[in-house]
Image (spheres, helix red, strand yellow):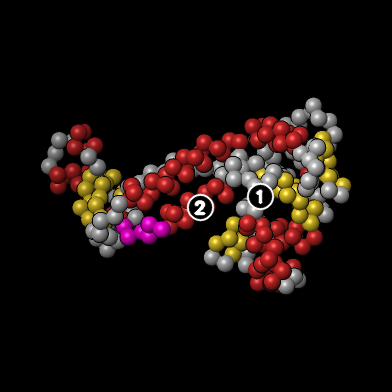
Amino acid sequence: FAGEPAEEYERMCKMLPLVSHLQPPADMVPIRIDRFSPNFNEAEKLGFANVRPLDAYSYVYPIDPSAMRNLAYFFNFDYQTPQNVDEYARQLDRAVHEWIAVWPQSDLFSIDTGDHLLIWDLRPIAQRPLTLLSDKARLIYLACESVNHPRQLSAQLGIDVDTITAELEKLVAMQVVMHDGGRYLSLAVQVGDYSPAQPVLDRFYRVARKLEHSETGVAVHLDHPRARSRRLVPARFEVDGNSVVVH
């Protein structure tokens, strides 16, 4: 768009790796001006210049340019103030296509057992494959399933703002919560109605087997190591001390 802040593209680049488990866009392309849109009707006011029919029309309709303008629906344009979109959008374009490439095997999902929240991180940026939350941290994470502010969370959960903010900043550092504009959003998708697709399930079992003999942190035990279910449900997970049992 005319006059858009180039730094917003850099900000979006930092966000995309956090959401690589969510369905990506089909592509990233420049905008196009269509007849009847605000960018067409108010082109000069919105910073566009030299709005003209797409070049393709001239190959199909050998008519006078003024008549072509009345016929066309799609238009090219210039900017009143020059801006090098290709330069500042290039990094985001690469990030979008990387998102498209990794998405089939990328996931970030959670299982709530009632006392504990298990966060499985299978994204390329994962710092650890499994995080176990309990008590206040669990309640705070669940309350951020919709965008929330620490003051709202404090009123909702009865926990002081400083404690909430400290817990959230830990989760932001682990990249399982997004922080933007003073508000927070937990990123893991709860297993229930949702269950990971088969490529992710294959990765999950491989990762879980590696954690079976973990000497630090949370150990994982698979009841039937050779069995592979096609669906994950919360009832299959149990927490026993520092061990997670997958039935």
Residue at 80% across / 60% down in the picture?
Answer: 135
| Left or right: 199, with 181 as reference point | right
Q: Is residue 3 magenta?
A: yes
Q: Nearer the viewer, residue 153 or 35?
A: 153
Q: Is residue 125 magenta?
A: no
Callout 1: helix, strand or loop? loop
Mark 1 nearby-residue class (10 Å; few <14, some 14–19, many ≥20): many
| Residue 100 percent coordinates (x, y) | 51, 38
Asked if one can make out residue 191 in the rendered structure from this viewpoint, the answer is yes
Pointer 1: what residue? Answer: 188
| Residue 179 percent coordinates (x, y) | 58, 60
Q: Nearer the viewer, residue 52 or 41?
A: 52
Of badges 1 and 2, the one in the foreground is: 2
Q: With respect to residue 67, does 149 lie above or below?
A: below
| Left or right: 22, with 245 as reference point | left
Residue at 29% across / 55% down in the picture?
Answer: 83
In the image, which residues are magenta?
Answer: 2-7
Q: With respect to residue 198, does 216 lie above or below?
A: below
Q: Nearer the viewer, residue 217 or 130?
A: 217
Separation of marks 1 and 2 at Cα, in angstroms: 17 Å
Pointer 2: what residue? Answer: 14
